[in-house]
Image: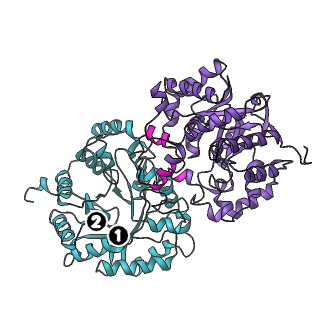
């Protein structure tokens, strides 16, 4: 972009010294494309447009998301900040370290920029992660070995579970969570967790700006521009969004280029408008149902499968 | 007792000078009995053996359980403490009063001993309850009209929602909630977070889901039926409501309840300790972490999704004989 006002803004990733684009590319949706060339086109277009933060997880589409991204990043690995997530779901350090090796191989790299514990959504996950021999020790070891530069965790269920994770005072560099204009007034990560992260200097990574699968847009309560602008105006490092077609990618890029944060009044107006729909969480199914809880986590926690208990 | 067994203990209903049996018959499972004759036999037997507290709900099996219970209690109405619930799920006073008339007609009585707001599970339910023209006004009106003696609410989701409901300041006589050893260990525990407050206020506490609503802890051999039910009945509650759709289940629970002596504090702690490792993620309490126990009626009122292809929803619709359209009978009037 020639005009600076039209480029994709960057922000500091907490205290890491890295700078990330305010829009990040979600890894789950990348895994839904038909073929490698589709993934290549999306990833290359994103990088060319200034997106430098790429999200993924060991368990997305049984590894396909990492495979697709690894291939697409060939020759461009050093242009991006690469994150993936470990899916121990309460299992021990050894499982976590094995998954790290798999993720590195699939992503065709010798190190990750950010490695996060995935899907901390069950109430006893923090206890299991911080138990002796738990996944938290893998985070420390991987960092010591230089295989990951920074570490964090993610979850979509309840701010109280996030606060339980943070209560251990582990030196997380990043924390990922749903942040949108509906969350703002319901079981709110924005109210309960975001200020705590700011106090600790941990980089907040926002996600589910449209409700996880566009639930908030289909309802007609907000437009994509309003929803994404709200999320990106919060004090976050980046907003991770699933973009599985060039159309969605372009739509989001258009909003993010030269982005100016909404002012207080505009933010409050959006919160007020969404409040009528937010009070019972029916547009935030990831908080209220099992719909967004993946199969491996369910298995580890001996919950019924998606087929047996979809919601 | 003719068979030489002791009676089921009676306990005070909150601050009222009324006694009810410490074991209560759940209404939903009555509708799971194979036919009305069997349901009637179960209710007869329960009354004969000393159960005086009967639970029901406007929306259980689309009214079938209220109709069956109404006919089964003919001639016995005055010997029992009859409760049913109103299913506004955030909707207004007028709807609540129409549901009350339907419940009274189905139950063949001119008054209820206890009328409760059903399924207070979503975080805005308390706001919708207490708002102008909300269901709270129906509870007050029905009491004034002499159609109900006492009022309360019920829910299975989150202690915070119960506390918000209590925080509305509405004078509830009774509150119903899940109480079992798994609940006691989980972060979202009704026993730890709600029960003490109700005891302080002298509100009648109605325990439910002693078997976790599914019977799974017993089916999987983690605890025996006796351990589970004795745990729930040993808490400071007025009664424990449990579903008994088979004679064997009824007899089993009667055996435990007759001559019941509460467990000691040490025995209670030992039961809690035994299930601790399986309680932390609520795998045995699906009513707290999924929509599984949220009736289609509640989901529809709150615009939660109902995917007819999903097995769980099919089961729920099948059980409730629900057409997917709200209130067909009321709309026809």
Q: Secondary structure at mark 2?
A: loop
Assess disc 2: are there few (<14), some (14-19) or many (≥20) residues with their C-alpha within 10 Å of its C-alpha: some
Which hue belongs to chain B? purple
Residue B230 vs B137, above or below: the answer is: below
Q: Is residue A146 visible?
A: no
Q: Secondary structure at mark 1?
A: helix
Q: Is residue B264 magenta?
A: no
Q: Is residue B296 magenta?
A: yes
Residue B9 place in picture, x, y as percent: 83, 42
Residue B93 place in picture, x, y as percent: 51, 24
Sequence-first tag of 1 and 2: 2
**Are the residues tagged 1 and 2 within 8 Å (C-beta)?**
yes
Mark drawn on residue A32: 2
The answer to whether residue B172 is left or right of residue B318 is right
Residue B153 place in picture, x, y as percent: 61, 35
Q: Start and end of the magenta stretch?
A: B288-316
Marks 1, 2 in one chain: yes
Residue B290 vs B197, above or below: the answer is: below
Determine the chain carrying the residue at label 1.
Answer: A
Residue highlighted by disc 1: A61
Which hue belongs to chain A? cyan
Closer to the camera, B46 or A259? B46
Determine the chain carrying the residue at label 2.
Answer: A
Assess disc 1: are there few (<14), some (14-19) or many (≥20) residues with their C-alpha within 10 Å of its C-alpha: some
Instruction: Determine the residue located farthest toward the top in the rendered image.
Output: B145
Residue at screen point 28% across, 80% down:
A108
Alpha-carbon distance for marks 1 and 2? 8 Å
Q: Quadrant of residue A262?
A: top left
Residue at screen point 35% across, 39% down:
A274
Residue A80 place in picture, x, y as percent: 24, 70
């Amino acid at each position: 972009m020639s005009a600076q006002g039209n480029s994709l803004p960057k922000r500091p990733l907490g205290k890491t010294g890295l700078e990330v684009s305010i829009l990040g590319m979600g890894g789950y949706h990348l895994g839904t494309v038909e073929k490698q060339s589709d993934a290549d086109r999306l990833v290359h277009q994103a990088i060319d447009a200034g997106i430098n933060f790429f999200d993924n997880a060991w368990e997305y589409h049984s590894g396909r998301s990492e495979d697709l991204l690894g291939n697409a990043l060939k020759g461009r690995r050093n242009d991006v900040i690469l994150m993936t997530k470990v899916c121990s779901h309460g299992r021990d350090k050894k499982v976590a370290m094995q998954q790290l090796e798999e993720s590195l191989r699939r992503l065709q790299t010798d190190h990750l920029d950010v490695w996060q514990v995935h899907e901390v959504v069950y109430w006893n996950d923090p206890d299991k992660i911080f138990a002796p021999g738990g996944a938290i020790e893998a985070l420390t070891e991987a960092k010591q070995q230089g295989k990951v530069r920074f570490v964090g965790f993610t979850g979509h269920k309840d701010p109280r579970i996030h606060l339980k994770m943070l209560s251990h005072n582990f030196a997380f560099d990043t924390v990922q969570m749903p942040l949108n204009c509906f969350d703002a007034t319901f079981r709110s990560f924005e109210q309960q967790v975001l200020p705590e992260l700011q106090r600790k200097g941990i980089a907040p990574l926002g996600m589910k700006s449209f409700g996880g699968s566009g639930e908030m847009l289909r309802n007609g309560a907000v437009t994509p521009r309003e929803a994404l602008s709200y999320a990106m105006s919060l004090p976050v490092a980046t907003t991770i969004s699933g973009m599985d077609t060039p159309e969605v990618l372009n739509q989001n890029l258009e909003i993010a280029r030269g982005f100016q944060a909404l002012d207080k009044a505009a933010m409050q107006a959006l919160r007020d408008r969404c409040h009528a729909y937010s009070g019972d969480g029916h547009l935030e199914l990831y908080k209220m149902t099992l719909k967004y809880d993946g199969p491996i986590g369910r298995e580890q926690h001996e919950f019924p499968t998606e087929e047996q208990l979809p919601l | 007792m003719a068979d030489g067994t002791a009676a089921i203990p009676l306990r005070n209903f909150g601050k009222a000078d009324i006694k009810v049996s410490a074991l209560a018959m759940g209404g939903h499972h009555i509708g799971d009995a194979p036919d009305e004759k069997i349901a009637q036999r179960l209710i007869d037997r329960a009354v004969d053996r000393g159960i005086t507290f009967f639970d029901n709900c406007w929306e259980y099996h689309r009214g079938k359980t209220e109709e069956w219970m109404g006919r089964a209690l003919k001639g016995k109405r005055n010997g029992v403490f009859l409760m049913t619930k109103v299913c506004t799920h955030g909707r207004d006073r007028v709807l609540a009063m129409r549901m009350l008339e339907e419940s009274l007609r189905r139950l063949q009585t001119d008054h209820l001993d206890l009328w409760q707001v059903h399924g207070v599970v979503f975080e805005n339910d308390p706001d919708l309850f207490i708002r102008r023209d909300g269901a709270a006004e129906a509870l007050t009106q029905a009491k004034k009209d002499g159609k109900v003696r006492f009022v309360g609410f019920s829910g299975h989701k989150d202690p915070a929602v119960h506390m918000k409901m209590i925080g509305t300041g509405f004078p509830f006589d009774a509150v119903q909630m899940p109480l079992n050893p798994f609940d006691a260990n989980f972060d979202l525990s009704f026993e730890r977070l709600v029960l003490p407050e109700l005891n302080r206020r002298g509100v009648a506490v109605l325990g439910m889901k002693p078997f976790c609503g599914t019977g799974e802890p017993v089916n999987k051999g983690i605890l025996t039926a006796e351990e589970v039910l004795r745990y729930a009945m040993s808490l400071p509650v007025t009664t424990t409501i449990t579903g008994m759709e088979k004679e064997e289940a009824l007899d089993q629970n009667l055996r435990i309840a007759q001559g019941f002596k509460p467990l000691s504090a040490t025995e209670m702690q030992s039961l809690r300790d035994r299930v601790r490792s399986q309680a932390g993620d609520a795998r045995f309490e699906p009513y707290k972490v999924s929509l599984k126990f949220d009736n289609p009626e509640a989901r529809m009122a709150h615009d939660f999704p109902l995917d007819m292809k999903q097995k769980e929803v099919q089961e729920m619709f099948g059980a409730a004989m629900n057409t997917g359209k709200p209130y067909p009978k009321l709309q026809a009037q």
